[in-house]
Amino acid sequence: MLSARGPATLISACRQAPGVHSTARSVSSAPSTDLPLSGIRVLELGQVIAGPFCGQLLAHFGAEVIKVEPPKTGDPLRVWRELDVDGTSPWFRSMGRNKKSVAIDMRMEEGRQLVKQLALKSDVLLENFKPGTLEKWNLGPAALHPHNPALIFTRVSGYGQTGPWASRPGYASVCEAESGFRYINGHPDETGALSGAPVRPNISLGDSVAGLHAAFGTVLALLARRTKTDRGEDGGQVVDVSIMESMLNLMEGIVPEYDRKGKSPRTPTPACPPPPPPPPPDAPSPDAPSPDAPQPPAFIVIGANGDTLYAKLMHAIGRGDLVGPAYAHNQHRVQHQAQIEAAISAWTRAHTVADAERVMRAAGVPVGRVNSVREVVACEQVRARGAVEDVWVGKGGEEGEGEGEGGWNVKMPKVFPVLEGYDVRTRWAGPDLGAHTDEVLTGELGVGQAELQRLRKEGVIG
């Protein structure tokens, strides 16, 4: 199947061989005072994924992120998918790491006033509500900039703060479809065109990509604020992030190709075999198969788009008949795509992943297996780079606390990129709901103990 980068970039099935599983335990902490965003305070009002993912990135690189959550329920992500022994989702422990949780009911006027006071002492206000929500609460830029002209508003929504679709609810899956991303991803039929429903990635890709754009935009706004301040101008601004536009940013050459050639391909980046039928509800997890159970096919990705790499690949699989003037360049091979990919698939089906990798690497052809989560964690490159870390979850969520009281480690992907000269590690897991309410309200707003008790009794805080 034609790749966005040309034929011979293939996901192909191989005979399965048993994998290995390994674990590691470590507890780490690192000072945050010398990180790139040290001294920056972010007030996070968002929930679930897109906004909080931005907050997670900013917190990891030194920003003090104060996360405001509803007192009784907290961020809905706390109870999404599988729950841990304490009833909290490990997903939230990862998304909330390095943040301070403050439980305030923003549906109450007194709660909104507390949030306003925190916003006036912050550098960034991060939110991913439906556009107009902050304005309804009198917490939008027009209400706060007169009191804090340097405040940066990072606003994540489905379609942006303006335009005819601005008021629509923004769901990542829908925005992925509307951006064109889903259209060009799916399973091929015998002609090489996509057939059936587009394939949905098994992660909330649109939310995470929007969070990346939001973090990037926030850092740009902070840099711009420094320049504006040097000129004597107010440094505050709005960073307007759209999930749909963030996904559109991933479309590479699809839009210009349509503009110049009039083509709108429904062609996947790799050529994928059809997925197996879903297992019954009581089937064991594919990441932990029984040693005696029949092994499902394993898959590898072979990247041989370039002319020289293509020739190496064909010689490596014994198909020198598919090398020559008729196959010399990408535009030639596109005309023989089905023949080329059939040859590759026939070869991989006769080899295990390990055998296929060995042959490809010996030939100098880029190759990699499609790893399960179990295989990712055990991967030597991942382990060597510390790309998966164990983060301690103890009393209050603080690193290292409560080990004798039933605490545990949670494996999390390390936050990237790596910055030379900085030891950037997770300092604590996502905290318990309201773990920092008293600390923040007392330390930053000067709220006394009697007032805290009253606010808590009346349900304003938690």
Image: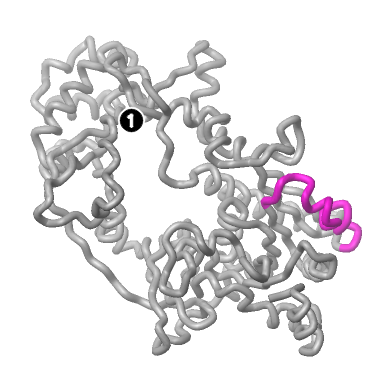
Say if 427 sits above or below 119 in the image: below
Q: Main secondary structure of the magenta part?
A: loop
Q: Quadrant of the N terminus?
A: top left
Give left or right: position of 388 versus 433: left
> Is 349 left, or right, of 54 in this rendering?
left
Residue at horizontal 63 percent and vertical 72 percent from the top: 101
* Whole-percent x, y for residue 403 in the image: 41, 86
Which residue lies under the disc numbered 1? Answer: 270
The extreme right residue here reads 146
Crowd rating for badge 1 (residues with CA inside 10 Å; few <14, some 14–19, many 20+): many
Q: Is residue 450 left or right of residue 389?
A: right
Q: Nearer the viewer, residue 144 or 72?
A: 72
Name the secondary structure under disc 1.
Answer: loop
**Quarter location, residue 230:** bottom right
Which stretch is magenta? Answer: 128-147
Residue drawn where x is 53% and y is 31% of the image = 177
Kind of residue sitting beneath label 1: Pro
The image shows residue 122 at horizontal and vertical percentages of: 75, 66
- Tell me, yes or no, if residue 388 can be seen here: yes
Instruction: Residue 69 in the image: state x and y as whole percent.
Output: 66, 66
Question: At which x and y percent is residue 71?
Answer: 67, 70
Task: Decide whether residue 146 is among the magenta residues.
Answer: yes
